[in-house]
Image (tube, rainbow, N blue to C red):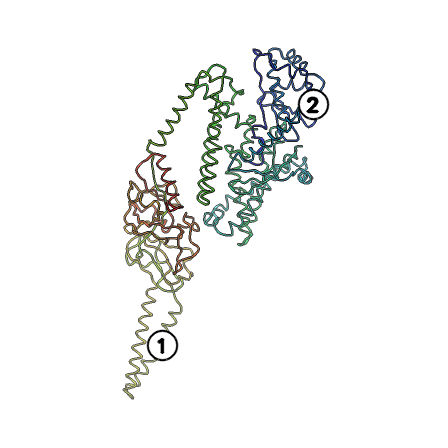
Amino acid sequence: MDPGYASLAAPAALALVGFLSMSDLFSTSWYRVADAVPRLRTQARVFRHVYRGEVWHLVQDLGSGKFLRLNPAAYHVVALIDGVRPLEEIWQHACEALGEEAPSQDDVIHLLGQLHQANVLVSNRLPDIEELEERRERNWKQRLKQYIANPMALRFPLIDPDRFLTRLMPLFPRWALPWMLLVWLALVGMGLFLTLRHWGDITADITRLIFTPEYVLMLLIVFPLLKAIHEIGHGIAIKLFGGQCHEMGMMLLVLMPIPYVDASHATAFLNKYQRILVGGAGMMIELAIASVALWLWTMAEPGLMRVFLHEVVLVAGVSTLLFNINPLLRLDGYYMLSDWLEIPNLGQKSNRYFGHVLKKYVLRAKKHLNPPETEHGEAPWLFSYSVLSFLYRMFIVTVIVLFVAQQLFFIGMLLAAWAIYMMLVLPLGKSLKAAWFDPALAEKRGRLVSASTGFVLVMAYLILLVPLPAATAVEGVTWMSERSQLRAPASCFGLQVLANPGPVMRGQPLVVCEDELLDMALAELQAKRDEHLADLARADRQDRVLAMNIREELAYTEASIADLQRRLANLEVLSPHAGRFVLASRRDFVGRFWQRGDIMGYVVDPERFTLMVVVPQRDANRVREDLRKVSLQAADTPGRLHSARLVREVPAATDELPSMALSLQGGGRIGVNPQPDSEGMPRALQQLFVLELTLDDPEPISAFLGQRVHVRFAHSPEPLGRQIYRVVRDVFAERFLI
């Protein structure tokens, strides 16, 4: 839940008061309150709102920030409460003025109870000290329940930021609001232009960078800082339109500390666009900061400052667009959508409407069925939002629980149990209890039981018996044999590319290097050979023993010359076989220094093209024993599937990685042990099985040699329950060696 608007979504913060018909006008409890003289507290304020053409009034307790929403008939009664008229006179006046729309005595009592609970009503009677203490304790428990009810977002109020925000207001005069909006549009437009222009640089190696120590450290600094500015933006917008902000604290969102402010006072704003602007103020500030950071990032030199700016762009831009603006989560986008649709309390109202649909069309209830008040065009929005928001929340909770469980297993399991109970079991139990005692379903309890039982049986059938596709998803790397790799024959500089990338024949010259030291050594030996030849010509006529020694030295020199000539000839790299020539780095080949053994390129031969795939130990047996089909797609071409088959597997588990492209640092999924092996090679944190695949049609992805591929091993279909059991069993086996 968005901390900036958290209190608006609390059920106790916004009560909808309705009235029954005239069929039950009098109440047996009326004599107890008829002579009471009620009045509104001085801290109560009344605001007039128009929702979809209908006038409503909001009563707010300025102390707590709670709201009570009143329809016209309820407001007529509240307007007569002046601390002078007794309740009997107020009711009689309402009956005369409203006629058939007049409330019953029970309705008035219920209204007074709502006002009393909202702490905006007092009377001429002495207060009941015990009742006040019970109310205080009840309010405290209710507030505590709101803070801990969502296990994914625990809120802890800390300070009252109103004075601080008041001091900031001279920096944001209201008359300058149109100019500030123009500046914001200019900044965001500049940020969008820079994003499109530098998109490749911004996203290059992003999956590798975010796991580096520099980015992790910067995330711990940038994320809370930006979110604090985000929440201050909500507070500034509230103060800008005359509201108040009296609560700021810290929320643990999936164990990540994030600041929040209570922006419930924005509900009192008459203009819905002001309320929308309050909801979007935090996102607007973040996007402006992201634009400025991106502009500075394009000019920054490599270093921590560039990392900091890149992190700001990612957090302020991505988190805003993917999370805050999403209306299916109780974040800024939800409240903006609610205000735009003019449907206050959209989440609760959509759930009530969905319950009404179930009663009417599933349980076929007809008597005592009170449909929720909806305006023209609201029903599709309410039904769609109820279904989509529930499914999306369950999806988000599942993803978060799995993520936490992978990092902190016990905390993840506790979090999962808490989330299932608070967000599924408890609401379902309350709904069934309310349905059982609902007068509209009194005659439909048999249908309720049968429908609930049928739903449970259908879900059990779908989960336990209906086979669903099952697969194991892993990663691999495209691979070629050693013969297909063009390695530098010696330490040399690139001189010339002799063949264009593409089809080549066996023995065709591809590239040539130069080594000036070899050329100089060859020239020196050739000169030395000429000297030996001249000395030999003189010695043959004067000293045969000396001539014999010179011949030995000459033979050694000629052998050295032949070796150097052979090494120089090897600097011209030939194609080892027919195939397609792929140069590792064509642009910077010429002039680049290559160490001996460096891979300069490849000659791709479809017959020698394979893929090395790593499978975690827990999935190895299933891949061996139940393999129906293998498909894959290259990381650079998602959506293009290719079929493959298993040709070989390493019989024993190993922690050696075929390629760093499969590691977290290379953009893959496998964690790397910080301690390399004795030969300095990287090791995986878990035991892996290496499988070799061959493509049925390797040509389409042969250009992605040495890069990651996503591989899917299809298994025999099995029910969802069986798949979940398998995952849980493997996790326990891995964690506890069971």
Quadrant for residue 226, please give it: top right
The percent coordinates of residue 657 (x first, y second) are: 37, 53
Q: Quadrant of residue 115?
A: top right
**Seen in the image, is 727 located left or right of residue 298?**
left
Q: Is residue 394 above or below residue 433?
A: below
Pointer 2: what residue? 126
Of residues 152 and 49, the one nearer the viewer is 152
* Image location of residue 692, percent across then percent down: 31, 49
Mark 2 residue element: loop
**Is the residue under label 2 in contact with that under label 1 (CB below 8 Å)?**
no
- Residue at the right extreme, as displayed: 84
- The type of residue carrying mark 2 is Leu
Between disc 1 and disc 2, the foreground one is: 2
Sequence-wise, which precedes: disc 1 or disc 2?
2
The reply to whether residue 658 is visible in this rendering is: no
Quadrant in which the C terminus is drawn = top left
Separation of disc 1 and disc 2 at Cα? Answer: 121 Å
Q: Amino acid at mark 1?
A: Ala
Look at mark 1 in the image and give the residue it sits on: 527
Question: 242 and 393: which one is in front?
Answer: 393
